[in-house]
């Protein structure tokens, strides 16, 4: 890791094999590589700008300081972790486990987690906290639904979406639960198989970003954003973990017909053609997370 990295905004990109790459943002210069990880999948950022990385096969979570090269903390997870999220107010760390299908919550990102499950969800891929401390999670195999752990609650509750979306990834955008997904459920199953390290189904589009407003047990889709691909000019990217920062959305253009291994940025929620490209040579980019240069929490 170059010394200047600690003072720059860093975009972390996992390649699902053994490494996570750090790029200065928005310049896109590769400034460091985190090695020795076992199938890194998702990343999330805490209020200090530290990055948590989930390691799918080793069932571990590793925390790195902004610009750091060695873990400053590790946690053992009871399942195969894919996505994660940190509550900006409490510091609680939530983890979406693919198998067994649980959402684990580590109080203050420490100790032994509390497990939550919902019988309607046979797997989990990603999760996100909103500004009120409510936790949401999605499944690779449950179409038209997400699940919620309201702040202070002891059980997950199923949220029925107003559209039959096969969810792939989610993040709180500051106002809504923002979900990357498709009305074609084969996309969801393909992403699930890729998380287990096997080949995904062919991508059929369109993949869009759906903004969801949750009230009670219902989730109303109040907006849709099409993110176009610069190669084939069609909608359908990113298909893995994405990141929202203010009016930009960032994600890898991966695992689809006509894909590249680049990381693209679009205007959010406007969408359309990408406004910025970071070129990479990594074969299996999966998760992205942006750690700010200052100690300011990003969603």
Image (cartoon, rainbow, N blue to C red):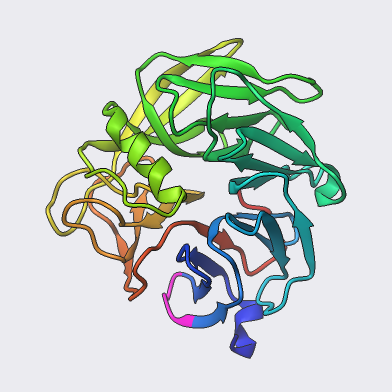
Residue that appears at 36% across and 36% down: 189
Q: Is 123 situated above or below 15?
A: above
Q: Residue furthest toward the bottom?
A: 3
Residue at 21 percent of width and 37 percent of height:
205
Q: Main secondary structure of the magenta part?
A: loop
Residue 43, position as x, y percentages in the image = 58, 56
Which residues fall within the magenta stretch?
26-30
Among the 4 quarters of the image, the one containing residue 73: bottom right
Q: Along the horizontal axis of the image, is 79 left or right of 40?
A: right
Q: Against 17, is 223 above or below?
A: above
In front of the other: 273 or 262: 262
265 vs 60, nearest the viewer: 60
Q: In the drawing, does residue 3 fall left or right of residue 78?
A: left
Does the magenta portion include 44? no
| Residue at (16% x, 56% y) in the render | 258
Residue extending furthest right? 111
Residue 227 is situated, as x and y percent measured from the top left of the image, at 28, 45
Mark count: 0
Quarter occupied by residue 54: bottom right
């Amino acid at each position: 890791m170059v010394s200047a990295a600690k003072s720059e905004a860093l975009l972390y990109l996992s390649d699902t094999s053994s490494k996570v790459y750090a790029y200065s943002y928005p310049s896109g210069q590769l400034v460091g590589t985190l090695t020795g990880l076992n199938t890194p999948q998702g990343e999330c950022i805490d209020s200090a700008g530290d990055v948590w990385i989930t390691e799918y096969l080793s069932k571990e979570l590793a925390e790195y300081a902004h610009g750091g090269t060695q873990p400053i903390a590790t946690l053992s997870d009871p399942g195969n972790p894919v996505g994660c999220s940190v509550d900006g107010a409490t510091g609680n760390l939530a983890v979406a486990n693919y198998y067994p299908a649980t959402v684990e919550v580590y109080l203050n990102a420490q100790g032994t987690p509390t497990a939550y499950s919902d019988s309607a969800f046979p797997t989990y891929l990603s999760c996100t906290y909103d500004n009120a401390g409510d936790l949401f999670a999605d499944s690779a195999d449950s179409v038209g639904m997400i699940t919620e752990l309201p702040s202070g609650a002891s059980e997950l509750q199923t949220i029925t979406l107003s559209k039959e979306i096969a969810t792939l990834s989610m993040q709180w955008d500051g106002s809504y639960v923002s979900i990357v997904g498709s009305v074609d459920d084969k996309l969801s199953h393909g992403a699930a198989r890729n998380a287990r390290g096997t080949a995904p189904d062919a991508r059929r589009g369109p993949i869009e970003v759906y903004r969801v407003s949750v009230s009670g047990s219902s989730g109303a889709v109040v907006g849709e954003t099409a993110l176009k691909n610069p190669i084939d000019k069609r909608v359908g990217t990113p298909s893995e973990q994405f990141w929202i920062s203010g009016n930009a959305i960032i994600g890898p253009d991966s695992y689809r017909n006509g894909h590249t291994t680049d990381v693209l940025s679009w205007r959010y929620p406007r969408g359309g053609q990408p406004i910025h490209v970071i070129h990479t040579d990594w074969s299996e980019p999966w998760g992205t997370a942006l750690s700010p240069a200052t100690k300011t929490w990003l969603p």
